[in-house]
Image (tube, helix red, strand yellow):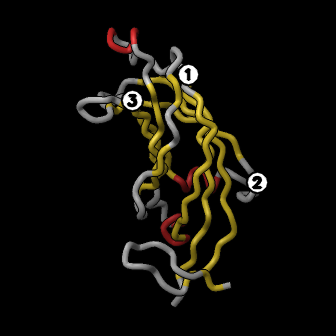
């Protein structure tokens, strides 16, 4: 039995007002920040923007990504858009700066025509829960399509048109 999927396109535009990120080390070396975007509740893992040079509090990416959402999970409100801002580090792994969690059902239901491009933003929060700025993005939901099977990794194999 085919499973219905819906395309979800997102463009991570920029972040604004990233507070408390500049430290002594970053004063001498420009921080490079990227956004890791995932949809909690589906496979595969996060997609990443290219590195943005960190100038003060407003990194810019303007980077498009595409996800395939299982329609039933979207309607059941079990999918959450997760946008994590991370700082690229040479030693010790990348550092999480802030994240935003947005239920996809809110974005889907908030539109009269879900297939139009929509613009939105979300507050970013630190691990401790403090507000850390805003992330701006645009998004669009595509039409639904059926898939005849899923691969071993859970990915869509063949659309049924």
Q: Nearer the viewer, mark 1 or mark 3?
A: 3
Q: CA distance from mark 2 to mark 1?
A: 27 Å
Q: CA distance from mark 1 to mark 3?
A: 13 Å
Quadrant in the rendering for residue 160:
bottom right
Q: Are marks 1 and 3 in contact (CB under 8 Å)?
A: no
Say whether residue 149 is left or right of residue 141.
left
First-in-chain label (1 vs 3)? 1
Say what secondary structure mark 3 lies in.
strand
Q: Disc 3 designates what residue?
A: 87
- Residue 143 coordinates in the image, percent (x, y): 69, 69
Label 2, residues with CA under 10 Å away: few <14, some 14-19, many ≥20: few
Q: Residue sitting at 50 percent across and 45 percent down?
A: 102
Residue nearer the viewer, 61 or 129? 61
Q: Nearer the viewer, mark 2 or mark 1?
A: 1
Q: Residue sitting at 50 percent across and 21 percent down?
A: 54
Q: Residue sitting at 39 percent across and 29 percent down?
A: 87
Label 1, residues with CA under 10 Å away: few <14, some 14-19, many ≥20: some
73 vs 86: above or below:
below
Q: Are marks 2 and 3 in contact (CB under 8 Å)?
A: no
Say whether residue 70 is left or right of residue 126.
right
Q: Disc 1 designates what residue?
A: 58
- Residue 16 coordinates in the image, percent (x, y): 56, 23
Say what secondary structure mark 2 lies in.
loop
Q: Disc 2 designates what residue?
A: 116
72 vs 51: above or below:
below
């Amino acid at each position: 039995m085919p499973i219905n999927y819906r395309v979800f396109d997102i463009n991570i535009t920029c972040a604004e007002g990233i507070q408390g990120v500049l430290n002594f080390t970053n004063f001498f070396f420009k921080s490079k920040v990227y956004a890791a975007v995932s949809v909690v509740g589906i496979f595969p893992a996060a997609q990443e923007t290219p590195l943005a040079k960190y100038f003060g509090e407003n990194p810019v990416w303007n980077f498009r990504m595409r996800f395939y959402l299982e329609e039933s999970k979207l309607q059941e409100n079990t999918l959450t858009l997760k946008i994590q801002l991370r700082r690229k580090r040479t030693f010790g792994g990348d550092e999480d700066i802030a994240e935003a969690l947005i239920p996809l059902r809110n974005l889907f239901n908030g539109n009269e025509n879900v297939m139009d491009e929509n613009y939105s933003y979300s507050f970013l929060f630190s691990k401790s829960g403090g507000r850390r700025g805003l992330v701006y993005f645009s998004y669009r939901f595509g039409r639904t399509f059926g898939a005849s099977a899923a691969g071993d990794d859970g990915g869509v194999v063949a659309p049924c048109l």
